[in-house]
Image (spheres, rainbow, N blue to C red):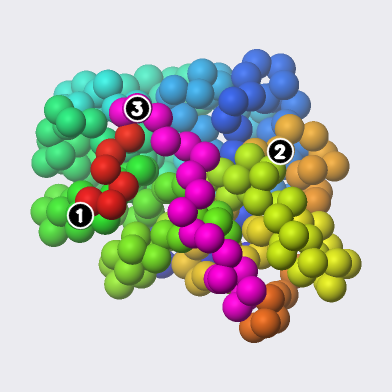
Amino acid sequence: MILKTPLMAMPALGLGTWPMKGAECERAVESALSLGYRHLDTAEMYGNEEAVGAALARSALPREEVFLTTKVWFDKPDEASFHDAALRCLERLRQPHVDLLLVHWPSPGMDLPGILSALAKLHAAGLAKAVGVSNFPPALLRRALELAIAPLACLQVEHHVMLDQSALLAVTEPAGMVLTSYTPLGKGDVTEHPVIQAIARRHGATGAQVALAAILARGRVAAIPKAAGPERQRENLGALSLRLSPQDLEELRALPGDRRFVNPDFAPDWAA
């Protein structure tokens, strides 16, 4: 399942790699690629870009078949520091380019025009085939789009069946952006909800597959669940063939939509 926009084509289901590191991360990436995953997500802050790069280098897959995302941490708040950090990401990944480069988090001292200029230059130089942002609330995302400095293709944010992100989707959808859902299984908690379990039983599926299928049914929305072992990776891939009914989706929409699992002290005002 490929999500296509004028700015990029992204596999709808990818492998999230946080917080795996070292050999564990390498094994997970190798396993995922062997099972058919073609979308890998990492970040400077994860401390595993070297492991992801090593596993990708050992793969026999042509590089153009794998969609690779990385992110620059928020302590690079200006154009020069962001640009230099992105180059170091490429060095750790052992790659001439990434398919998607994101601003990992906004920060109070962020020079937004400068950061967007860095993204635009990295994109123009072919070092990032597409660029975007992560963890931007609606008002900041609208401002970034209005500045029209960089061709923003994606917003990555926490999103699952118990965290409604309609306010962000109302920005990304008209802009032709993909919304990528991290923590799409709510760290496993949402998959055990009685409503999700009941829907899973109706389909002979798992709670994780239902939770992922619900996200993917939103349209231009991707998901990057973390899965270390082949069994869980294979289970998550099963969500691609699960078709939820209108009744299923209605029941899921009725769930509380304000449950956050990722809300660090440096997070922005999500309601802004």
Q: Residue at x 74, y 60 (%)?
A: 194
Label 3 or label 1, whichever comes before in sequence order: 1
| Secondary structure of the residue carrying numbered label 3 | loop
Label 2 or label 1, whichever comes before in sequence order: 1
- Residue 66 position, x and y percent, is 59, 46
- Residue 63 position, x and y percent, is 58, 42
Image quadrant of residue 204?
bottom right
The answer to whether residue 96 is above or below residue 153 is above
Which is more toward the observer, 9 or 152?
A: 152
| Secondary structure of the residue carrying numbered label 2 | loop
| Secondary structure of the residue carrying numbered label 1 | helix
Residue 259 drawn in magenta: yes
Q: Which residue is labeled 2 in the image?
A: 227
Q: Residue at x 69, y 33 (%)?
A: 29
The answer to whether residue 171 is above or below residue 231 is below
Image quadrant of residue 199?
bottom right
* Residue count near mark 3 (Cα–Cα under 10 Å), binned few <14, some 14–19, many ≥20: few
Which is more toward the observer, 192 or 208?
A: 192
Specify the segment rendered in magenta.
249-266
| Amino acid bearing label 1 | Ala
- Residue 269 position, x and y percent, is 26, 43
| Amino acid bearing label 2 | Ala
Which is more toward the observer, 193 or 64?
A: 193
Q: Which residue is labeled 1 in the image?
A: 139
Residue 20 drawn in magenta: no
Left/right placement of residue 238 relative to residue 167 reads: right
Q: Which residue is labeled 3 in the image?
A: 265
* Residue count near mark 2 (Cα–Cα under 10 Å), binned few <14, some 14–19, many ≥20: many
Tell me the mark number nearer the camera, choosing from 2 and 1. Answer: 1
Q: CA distance from mark 2 to mark 1?
A: 32 Å
Q: CA distance from mark 3 to mark 2?
A: 26 Å
